[in-house]
Each structure stands twice: as structure tokens, then as C-alpha cells.
Amino acid sequence: MEAEIVVEYDGAKIAQAVAEAVSPDNFKTPRNLSVKTTVEGKKVITRIEHYGKLPTFIATIDDLLFSVCTAENTLQTTKKL
């Protein structure tokens, strides 16, 4: 199974910050799972490949989206300070 998730932001700095916040997940995956996050301009692109059960694949996508939302909320909070 494969998925590509693309999130576009208002600026490249925000995209870079979000990508850096979720990138540690790239290194904590089981052997049958690959998660790669990159930045292209204002876009954060995550490619997920999984050779296993569907629930694990869905949980990985859910975890990624939760991490992206957390990073976005943190950036919003720091803007207000």
C-alpha cells in the first residue's frame, strides 16, 4: 500500500518547520513500513509505503496527520506570543 499526503502552507518557512517537526517519524518505523517527509517550496510531502495489514497503514496516516496538526497548532500559538 502506498499513500502520498501533500499539505501546502502560506510560506516555505512554515512548511520547513512542519516537516522538521514530523520528520523524526521517518526513523522510527518497522521494517515493512517506510515514511519519508520532504519539503518542496511551500508544500510538505509525505510518502508512506507499507507491506502489511491495512489497520497499521491507516494508523500510520492518522499518526502523521495528528503530528502535522500538533505542529501547526504550536506554530499558531507561538505567533500569538
Image (tube, grey):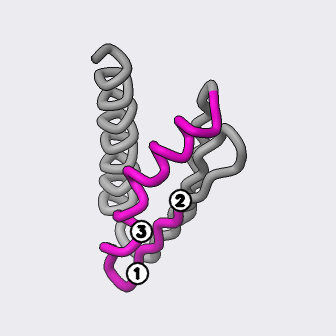
Question: What residue does disc 3 label?
Answer: 26
Mark 1: few/some/many CA within 10 Å (<14, 14-19, 20+): few
Chain-order first, disc 3 or disc 1: 3
Does the magenta-highlighted stretch encompass residue 61?
no
2 and 1 marks in contact (CB < 8 Å): no
Residue farthest front in this picture: 81
Amino acid type indicated by mark 1? Asn
Instruction: Give the extent of the magenta segment.
Output: 11-36
What SS does tag 3 mark? helix
Mark 3: few/some/many CA within 10 Å (<14, 14-19, 20+): some
Image location (x, y in percent) of residue 37: 53, 59
Question: What residue does disc 2 label?
Answer: 37
Q: Which of marks 2 and 1 is in front?
A: 2
What SS does tag 1 mark? loop
**Residue displayed at 36% across by 33% down:** 69
Chain-order first, disc 2 or disc 1: 1
